[in-house]
Structure formats: structure tokens, C-alpha cells
Amino acid sequence: MIKKLRSMAIDGAQLNSDPTGFELISALIWIGRTKALVIKPDQTTKLLTTTDGRQKFRPPLPKGYFGNGIAWSCAQCSAGDLMTKPFSFAVKIVHEAIKAKTGGLWPSSESRQPVVSQLFWQSHQNLAQSGL
């Protein structure tokens, strides 16, 4: 099934790299959820996912640190676009949202724990405000 989804996603997506299985399944679920909830075509729909940032901090997190180092990535578009455009469109949006969070180094801080906590807290607040 993943092979079939990947071939559907690659057609027209113009991605710099092959989409991961996570991106493929996430895009498929996002489309299905949007259709199932009968979201109006002009409304924005979002897919929130967590991304691992443990290797992104500079300076790096202390050796032996075993707390969380995550942030949310957010793919979004109109429900109409998501439901009428090809599957490759949704995969590209998911892929780019995740890449935006994992593609570069994260901000540095003298105290890394508050940065991780702040990222989680901001993400939690954004999620709460989104109504999910």
C-alpha cells in the first residue's frame, strides 16, 4: 500500500526527496478527516504533527538529557484545495511543513531546558486555541 501511495504522491508533487511513510499516511488521514467532517471548501484545515528536535539545538542539549525536544509542524490549506487537488498536493504540504521544522538548526539559548519547555508550551497553547 505504501508503494502505491508513494507512486501517487510522486506524480506531480515535485518534492526534493521521496515522501516518508509517515507523510503519506498523514496526508491520507488528513484528507479523509476533512471529508468526514464536511469542512466547508473555503475554511482552512490543518494537520499538526510533532517533530523531533533533539539534534537541532546549537549548542546541543546536554549529554544524557532525556527530556522532550519536540515542536509542532503545521500543514494547512483550504478544505476545498485539499479535497479537490491530487493526493500529491496534500503530501507536498505535509512534507514541506515537516521539512520547515527539521531542515535547519533551532534557536540557541544559554539555558536549553526553558527553550524545550517554551516550544512545547507554545505548541500546546496553539493546539488549544485551534479547538482540537
Image (spheres, rainbow, N blue to C red):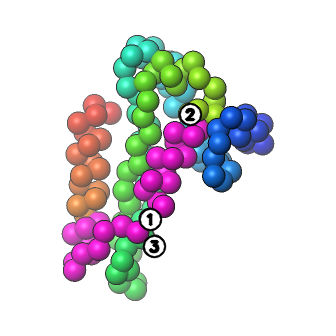
Instruction: Choose the circle earlier in sequence order: 2 or 1.
Output: 2
Q: Residue furthest bottom?
A: 63
* Residue at the disc numbered 3: 55
Q: CA distance from mark 2 to mark 1?
A: 23 Å
Task: Look at the picture and state if 122 lies above or below 57.
Answer: above
Q: CA distance from mark 3 to mark 1?
A: 10 Å
Instruction: Choose the circle earlier in sequence order: 3 or 1.
Output: 3
User: Which secondary structure lies at badge 2?
Assistant: helix
Q: Which three-letter amino acid code belongs to the residue tagged 1?
A: Gly
Viewer-proximal residue among 21 and 93? 93
- Quarter of the image where the N terminus is located: top right
Q: Is label 3 or label 1 in front?
A: 1
Residue 122 at x, y percent in the picture: 24, 52
* Lateral position of residue 6 relative to residue 61, left or right: right
Residue 79 at x, y percent in the picture: 45, 21
* Lateral position of residue 2 relative to residue 27, left or right: right
* Residue at the disc numbered 2: 90
User: Which secondary structure lies at badge 3?
Assistant: loop
Q: Quadrant of residue 23?
A: top right
* Residue at the disc numbered 1: 104
Instruction: Choose the circle earlier in sequence order: 2 or 3.
Output: 3
